[in-house]
Image: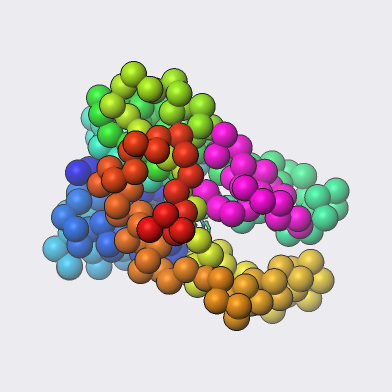
Amino acid sequence: MKVLITGGAKGLGRAFSEVLGAQGHQLVLTGRDERALGLARAELRAAGVDVETHVADLADPRATPKVIEHLGGIDVLVNNGALGGPVGPTWQVDETEWWHAVEVNLRGTASAANAAIRAMTRGRIINVVSNAGVHRWPYVTAYSVSKAAVVKLTENLAIELKDRPIAVLSYDPGMVDIGLMRRGAGTCSDDPHVQRIARWVRSQRAGGKFTPVEQSADLLARIVRGEFDHLSGGLVTPADA
Ligand SMILES: NC(=O)c1ccc[n+]([C@@H]2O[C@H](COP(=O)([O-])OP(=O)(O)OC[C@H]3O[C@@H](n4cnc5c(N)ncnc54)[C@H](OP(=O)(O)O)[C@@H]3O)[C@@H](O)[C@H]2O)c1
């Protein structure tokens, strides 16, 4: 299957790419960082994976749709690319930075999904969300609010698509020791709110609440294969594995 993964060159997206590539899927990776995309492309190709990469900023609502149109459609979209957004009391963080994170995480996800649906006769859209979109995550509200909105977008799109063979699922990969969570745990910032988040992330990790990256990527691969299409509109988590 032809699978487009936004933010596919780094963090969890990169882990997803490795598992999906090893399973023989044809990959298209996007992101802002041309160097990271080039490195991921070279390493995946060396492992025999059919992969192409495109620079596409999710803050530009035309960028990912252009890639999808250029490809003439895809079978699966993994809407993985996202920003953690600013950390701190909502009324104190920079509002422009807050809104930018919401735009990338919500509008970027919606624009990519819309373009994929327009170009697709059958397939699936997988929106990578987070526990932060289901439960309150104070001090990271741009992240929490945007992920909650993506969960609702998924539910609504699934109803609108119920007469077409296109499934739309939210996927919470669990808390994984990679990307946002690893950086969150390892920060050496003096900011008390950043430190508070770091302490919480470390306590979750120490308490065994993290999901191994392999488990997270394997479950994503099962969603890509269509094993959860019957739950279209719903949220898949590692508890469903
Ligand atoms: N790590 C976890 O434990 C965890 C838990 C739950 C959910 N998630 C979700 O998993 C996904 C990946 O997170 P991660 O932890 O791997 O974070 P990460 O390491 O920060 O990776 C984020 C990815 O998104 C891309 N990205 C960010 N802004 C972008 C933009 N404006 N346009 C295009 N691409 C953009 C980045 O690529 P460029 O820098 O090249 O743009 C990067 O590949 C996110 O949706 C996150 O919410 C992660």
How many numbered discs? 0
Identify the residue at horizontal 61%, vertical 47% (top origin).
133
In which quarter of the view is residue 112 placed?
top left
Task: Judge whether 26 appears above or below 87 on screen.
Answer: above
Identify the residue at horizontal 26%, vertical 56% (top origin).
20
Across and down, in percent, residue 6 comes to 40, 48
Across and down, in percent, residue 125 comes to 37, 38
Q: Quadrant of the C terminus?
A: bottom left
Magenta stretch secondary structure, dominant: helix
Task: Judge whether 46 appears above or below 125 on screen.
Answer: below
Would you say residue 203 sits in the magenta stretch?
Answer: no
- Could one spot residue 118 in this view of the protein? yes
Q: Please name the colour scheme applied to the rendered image.
A: rainbow
- Could one spot residue 143 in this view of the protein? no
Identify the residue at horizontal 42%, vertical 54% (top origin).
240
Across and down, in percent, residue 54 comes to 34, 47
Identify the residue at horizontal 55%, vertical 39% (top origin).
151
Would you say residue 148 sits in the magenta stretch?
Answer: yes
Across and down, in percent, residue 49 comes to 18, 59
Task: Judge whether 142 appears above or below 231 on screen.
Answer: below
- The segment highlighted magenta reads 128-152
